[in-house]
Amino acid sequence: MTLSDAQLAELIDNYAEFIIDGMDMDTLVTFAFDSLVAEFNKYSESELLSEIEELYDEDTLNDLLESVTM
């Protein structure tokens, strides 16, 4: 069977929704955490710092930095 690009995209969306529907809240939170950590591990230090500051603010960045440097 060969799916069109649109069919494949829809299958992927449906499969992801199926998996998520089968998760309880603790499993979903763990999955989200693990996914974020895996993505952030691909960043350089400067990319991570920039993202935190751009998405939140300098105070948040400073608070997070302080939590790991004290």
Image (cartoon, grey):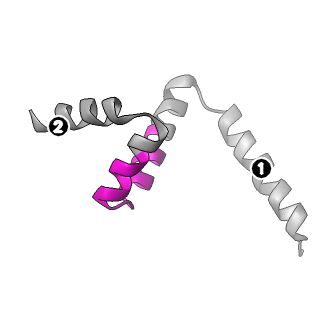
Residue 25 forms part of the magenta stretch: no
**Image side of residue 12 versus residue 22, left or right:** right
Q: Amino acid at mark 2?
A: Val
Judged from the image, the secondary structure of the residue bearing numbered disc 2 is helix
Up-down: is 60 above or below 6? Answer: above
The picture quadrant where one finds residue 52 is top left
**Image side of residue 40 versus residue 13, left or right:** left
Which residue is denoted by mark 1 in the rendering? 13
Q: Residue at x 85, y 54 (%)?
A: 10
Residue 45 forms part of the magenta stretch: yes
Which residue is denoted by mark 2 in the rendering? 68
The picture quadrant where one finds residue 8 is bottom right
Up-down: is 7 above or below 52? Answer: below
x and y percentages locating residue 57 in the rendered image: 40, 34
Which residue is more in the foreground, 3 or 35? 35
x and y percentages locating residue 16 in the rendered image: 70, 46
Q: How many marks?
A: 2
Which residue is more in the foreground, 3 or 58? 58
**Residue density around tag 2, few if under 14, some if 14–19, many if 20 or more, within 10 Å:** few
In terms of sequence position, does the residue under pointer 1 or pointer 2 come before the other?
Answer: 1
Q: Magenta part of the protein: which range? A: 33-51
Q: Amino acid at mark 1?
A: Asp
